Amino acid sequence: MTFKMDKPTLVKWMSKFLAIIFIGTASYDFFSSAISNEDQLKNYNMPEALRKIKVATSFDDSVVGEAASSSDNYKAYAEAVDQIQGLTVDDLNNVLESGTPAGKIYAAVLLHQSSKVGHNLSFDKLLNDKSAVAYKSGCKVMNTTVGEIAKTFVDTGSYHNFKYSMFCKLT
C-alpha cells in the first residue's frame, strides 16, 4: 500500500510533525529545568559559605603556604564554622549528598561537629566513596579519595593537619 500526496499537503503534514516534535522538546526542557530550578532554589537559600563549600575544588586545611593566607576553600569552611548557629542540617546534608568530593568532606566535618547527628554518621555515608579529591596543606598536595579521608576521620578524629574547630555546635 502506497500513499501519494501532493507537495502542499506533504509540506503541511511535515510542518505539523515538526511542530509536535518542537513542542515535545520544549515541554521536556521546561519540566526538566523546573526540577533543576528547585535544586537551584535550595542553593539560593543556602548561606554563601555553604554554597562555596559545595563547589570546593580541594579539601584544604588551615596551613598557610607561599600565598601567605588560607585558601578560599578553607576560608569558606571557617566562615561556615563562624555561622554554625545559622546553618541547618538540611543545608549541610544537601552539600554532603550533592557537593563536590571536597565539599562533601567539609559538610561531613561540619555535621560531625554538630550535636544533631551521631558521632560518625556524616562520615559513614562517605566511607565507600571512591571519588578522587586533592588534600592541600600549605604547599603540599596529596591525591586521595573521599572514602580514605572519611575513614581516617572515623579512626583518628582528624586528617593530617585538618582538625575540628573547637566549640562548634548546631542548636
Image: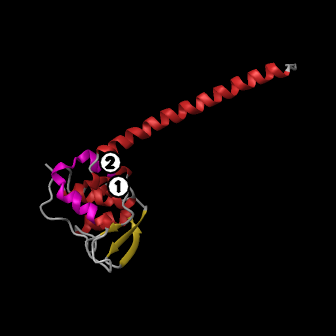
Q: Identify the residue at the far front of this view.
A: 8
What mark, if any, has residue 94 been given in the picture? 2
What mark, if any, has residue 54 been given in the picture? 1
- Residue 65's place in the image compared with 104, above or below, is below
Front label number (2 vs 1): 1
Left or right of 165 in this view: 144: right
Measured as percent of width and height from the top left, residue 160 is found at: 28, 74
Residue at 35% from the left image edge and 41% from the top image edge: 41
Identify the secondary structure beneath mark 2.
helix
- Residue 166's place in the image compared with 121, above or below, is below
Name the quadrant containing residue 1: top right
The magenta-colored residue range is: 75-95
- Residue 42's place in the image compared with 102, above or below, is above
Check disc 2 and give the amino acid type.
Answer: Asn
Measured as percent of width and height from the top left, residue 152 is found at: 29, 68
Measured as percent of width and height from the top left, residue 19 is found at: 65, 26
Residue at 26% from the left image edge and 54% from the top image edge: 121
Pick the residue in front: 133 or 62.
62
Q: Residues within 10 Å of mark 1 (few under 14, many from 20)?
A: many
Give the Cα distance between marks 2 and 1: 9 Å
Magenta segment, principal secondary structure? helix
Name the quadrant containing residue 36: top left
Check disc 1 and give the amino acid type.
Answer: Lys
Left or right of 62 in this view: 115: left
Residue at 38% from the left image edge and 38% from the top image edge: 38
- Label 2 close to label 1 by CB (< 8 Å): yes
